């Protein structure tokens, strides 16, 4: 298995874990009071958008040649870090 394949598989697996965390946040939003629910739903919407963006970046990475994928890796990691930070903030805020 190439380094690129291993890297992409690792990203996809982590995205699956984070998708489950977003689902948990949605469950909390359904049980929260009105003000908290509004805030949580806004954050969830932002997280889903970041999740979609990160998935798109990963798809670009998958379709890149073995030589070009390293160049795309930096953009993927920026999107990845932004998504992770947003999720961490949301989960810590609404524990």
Image (cartoon, rainbow, N blue to C red):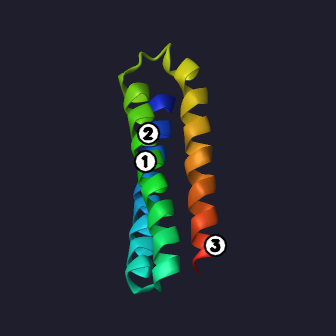
- What is the quadrant of the C terminus in the image? bottom right
Residue 40 appears in the picture as rendered:
yes
What secondary structure is found at the residue carrying circle 1? helix
Q: Are marks 1 and 3 in contact (CB under 8 Å)?
A: no
Residue 2: x, y in percent?
46, 29
Q: Are marks 3 and 2 in contact (CB under 8 Å)?
A: no
Q: Does residue 88 appear left or right of residue 64 in this picture? A: right
Q: CA distance from mark 1 to mark 3?
A: 19 Å
Q: Identify which residue is drawn at 44% across, 80% down.
A: 28
Q: Is residue 29 depicted above or below 61 in this figure?
A: below
Residue 55: x, y in percent?
40, 40
Q: Identify which residue is drawn at 51% across, 78% down.
A: 35
Q: Nearer the viewer, mark 1 or mark 3?
A: 1
Q: Which of the labelled discs sits on residue 53, or is there none?
A: 2
Q: CA distance from mark 3 to mark 2?
A: 22 Å
Is tag 1's residue or tag 3's residue first in the polypeptide sequence? 1
What secondary structure is found at the residue carrying circle 3? helix
Q: Which residue is mark 3?
A: 92
Q: Quadrant of residue 30?
A: bottom left
Q: Identify which residue is drawn at 56% across, 60% down.
A: 87
- What is the quadrant of the N terminus in the image? top left
Q: Which of the labelled discs sits on residue 49, or is there none?
A: 1
Out of 84 and 2, give the one closest to the viewer.
Answer: 84
Residue 91: x, y in percent?
57, 70
Q: Identify which residue is drawn at 59% across, 37% down.
A: 77
Q: Are marks 2 and 1 in contact (CB under 8 Å)?
A: yes
């Amino acid at each position: 298995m190439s380094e690129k394949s291993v890297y992409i598989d690792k990203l996809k697996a982590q995205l699956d874990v984070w998708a489950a965390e977003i689902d948990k946040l949605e469950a909390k939003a359904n049980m929260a009071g009105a003000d908290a629910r509004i805030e949580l739903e806004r954050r969830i919407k932002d997280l889903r958008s970041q999740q979609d963006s990160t998935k798109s970046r990963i798809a670009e990475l998958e379709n890149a040649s073995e030589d070009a994928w390293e160049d795309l890796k930096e953009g993927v990691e920026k999107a990845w870090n932004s998504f992770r930070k947003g999720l961490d903030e949301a989960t810590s805020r609404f524990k």
